[in-house]
Image: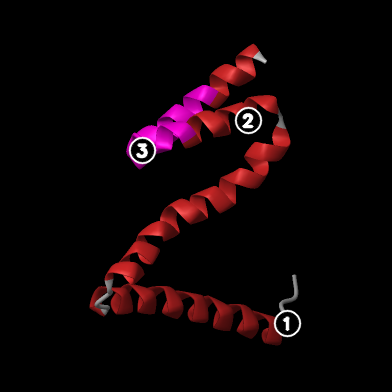
Amino acid sequence: MNVDPTTLLAILAMAVATYVTRIAGLFVADRLVLSGRAQAAFNAIPPAVLVAVIAPTALTTGWAEAIATLITALVATRLPLLATILVGVVSVVLLRAVL
């Protein structure tokens, strides 16, 4: 196997850039003083990312997934995140078995 030095250097540079930006984010986030709206925006990021990752698959796969998505969304208004995920997984498994 022949490895091109330019390609290897590009891969290593991208790995270093990725690592530095992730570590820098951890250091900078601890030092930020956020107002109420900014804090609310930061708190909304994890659920928004979760929805962005799950929604396309859940809503285009079939009826079991779509119904489980609706059940999970309703449960999410009352339960914490971990319990909501558990309800979502159990509901999709049961609905796949039934439908």
Q: Residue at x 37, y 65 (%)?
A: 42
Badge 2: few (under 14), some or many (20 or more) residues near its Cα, within 10 Å?
many
Q: Residue at x 44, y 78 (%)?
A: 21
Looking at the picture, does residue 89 appear above or below residue 50? Answer: above
Q: Earlier in the sequence, mark 1 or mark 3?
A: 1
Find disc 1 in the rendering and name its residue: 4
Residue contact between numbered discs 1 and 3, judged by CB atoms under 8 Å: no
Secondary structure of the residue carrying numbered label 2: helix
| Residues rendered magenta in the picture | 74-91
Residue in front for this viewpoint, 2 or 44? 44
Q: Where residue 12 sits: x, y (%)?
A: 56, 80
Q: Earlier in the sequence, mark 3 or mark 2?
A: 2
Most common secondary structure along the magenta stretch:
helix
Is 80 colored magenta in this rendering? yes
Quadrant hosting residue 45: bottom left
Find disc 3 in the rendering and name its residue: 82
Q: Residue furthest front?
A: 37
